[in-house]
Image (cartoon, rainbow, N blue to C red):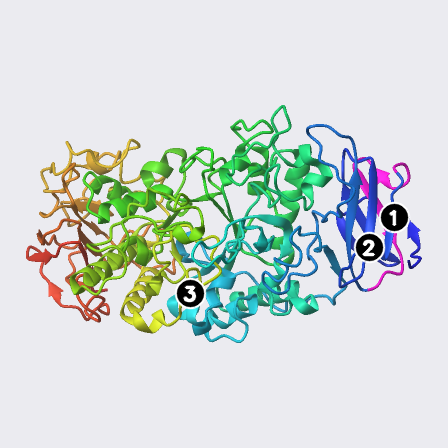
Amino acid sequence: MPDFPISRGRPLPLGVSPTPDGVNFVLLCRHGTDVRLVILPEQGGKKPLMEFRLDGRKNRTGDHWHVRVHDLPDTFTYGWRVDGPSGTKHRFDPSRILLDPAATMISGGAKWADTCETDPERTSRRALYHRAKEYDWGEDAPPLTAYEDSVIYEVHVRGFTCHPSSMVANPGTFAGLVEKIPYLQWLGVTAVELLPIHEFDECDCPFVNPKTGEKMTNFWGYNSIAFAAPKAAYAASAGEHGQIAEFRDMVKAFHKAGIEVILDVVFNHTGEGDDRGRTYSYRGLDNELYYLLDDHGRYLNYSGCGNTVNCNHPVVRDLLLTCLRYWGGHMHVDGFRFDLASILGRDSKGNVLVDPPVIEMIAEDGVLADCKLIAEPWDAAGLYQVGNFPFGRRWSEWNGKYRDDVRRFWRGELGMTGPLAARLCGSADIYQWNGRLPKHSVNFITAHDGFTLNDLLSYNGKHNELNGEQNRDGSNENYSWNCGAEGPSDDPLVTHLRQRQGKNLMVTLMLSQGVPMLLAGDEFLRTQKGNNNAWCHDNEISWVDWELEKTNRDFLRFVKELIWFRRRHPALRRRRFFRGEVDPQEWGSAPVGPFPASGPVRPSEAGKLDDSGRVKASATSRKPRVPALPNDDKPLFDIEWHGVKPFEPDFGHYSRTLAYTIDGRFTGREGEADYDPDVDFYVAVNSYHEAIRFQIPPSPSNRKWRCAIDTAADSPKDFIAEGEGPVVRAGSYISVPAFSTVVLVTDR
């Protein structure tokens, strides 16, 4: 065994760091009594280069164990052996070499699932140190796209380019994702939200495909084992320890294209699971410090994955903040989506905190001040915080109510017209009561967890049999509708209705106030064959089939035009909620919103008109009537609600139609000289099974209407370039076919 000189070292920073005369190692371990540093060769192996037992008096400062080792090679792997007291809350096992929680690289794993059979106990992967030259960021700068201007694209790094049809040189990698940037620019998205890219063990899936007998993998990766290490298998250069540089290259390339990078981070649990799970790191270092335990030492499971991280313990808070600062500061990431974020609000006993320290620390951290923070505001134990996530003025949220209400309206359910109106307005009924804004609502129809858009329109029930759990997994409440046939269909009536419904959902998403999020592949109707929980499929169920880009090119064109339509019009990307009745002289005062705090317009008020023929202000605003404008005897409204007749909305239980106009002179972006008044919009939606005639109101600015979008029309007439559509006269009638949307806009 080589003889490496050793000195006391310093207690900060945690992890491994180079010094002028060696390498400093620091481990936080409160209850350990016997701590040993193990240095191993670069290529792993069981025989260590060095194993050093730290002296509790010399090599310990408080709870930090530290040592400096001299003359080490530029690349090596290392880990820690820890022993300590026994008891129900401790799980010390000195036979295991543990990963460093602060590791930024882990050895091995360069090839996806390459150790599933050769290393069933997952004991070969180690923390990796590689002395590389300083990365040159050049002139890289974050796009800093405003929330309301964002169009988020949720994507799986491997699944996006793994299919042979992707035609990239480095499929399934960060480099492969870079090759698709021109496509994403063309599509018009402003941010990619990457499913977990932290190191996880894809081999930890316990299920086999019941049809083939093949062992399946943890494809999604919601089982982190190292919060600060990019996954080696996602880097084409991982064989040369290039995963950090390749990730940075990807971020830099996205920034150059004006696209932000948001990471899906999983801090609510780890891949160590419950009592039956493997020990990688945290459990063997300080089980009761890192996890929520009951009085008998059993894991509290608010995540549904076997364990729950003790997020609000000061030590764990510091670990999570350090990881976020690393990704935001050193890796130039633009934001984070927090999986099952409500768990961040629980204390050591699982109780819900009013002001959770870790959530406040993340919200107030200086390094993260420009980063987008997006919460999945629920957990697996029923804590549902949509509209009520702590310190919410800093946090946006996945709006699960948006997803469900929009799905339910478009499949024709009763009683959904009022909720749809609220969702179109940025969910003021959910967010406005505590001073929040439309940007706090991340609107989505589909996400990785659930049906794809195509499958939402093709299946009444989930079809997860190939997951190996007898179709018991996955949500049963999908609010889907197969449009007349379960699964693929050659019936033109069914296929046309599905296309129309897909367009309806996309129009609703892109015309809603808030922040739209699109699932990768939905723009050309990717299918998972009815599987709504494809976490374990590393195959064509989960891979994006790029042949569909050609097969469904008309639908792709429609979605692309919609995205750019939204991006062209600031009135669709308001920073404030609608106020109903507005006074231009007072524009810029505190927002009031389109609905009372209790929700949308009550059916008893719908359709009541004032003397000027407008909907009463009490139905849409709390402000008193404003004075008449010069040369005009009517007040202005930034949004007005209609039904089949102008100014007669029907929010009743049996209504399945809705129409509204937006006055483009009030974009909700006041104070910005570079935003001119926008066009006016008229939108009519019909989720009834027969065509409905709508009478067209005058445009708010008395300009002429032109048809821009008709989801019932075939391409290219479903989306007509602005200024080129046929003129539609105020007072005339248009027929809106069953399950369709019509959008009119004025000329500028």
Across the whole image, how many numbered discs are drawn on residues? 3
Q: Position of residue 350 (x, y in %)?
A: 55, 29
Q: CA distance from mark 1 to mark 2?
A: 9 Å
Residue 57 belongs to magenta span: yes
Left or right position of 534 against 23:
left
Residue 650 belongs to magenta span: no
Residue appearing at x 28%, y 42% in the figure: 422
- Say what amino acid the circle numbered 2 marks: Ile
Q: Answer yes or no: do the residues labelled 1 and 2 have beta carbons within 8 Å?
A: yes
Q: Position of residue 302 (x, y in %)?
A: 52, 34
Q: Quadrant of the image for the C terminus?
A: bottom left
- Please name the residue that numbered disc 2 is placed on: 39
What's the magenta region?
A: 56-73
- Say what amino acid the circle numbered 3 marks: Val
Q: Residues within 10 Å of mark 2 (few under 14, many from 20)?
A: many
Mark 3 or mark 2, which is nearer the start of the sequence?
Answer: 2
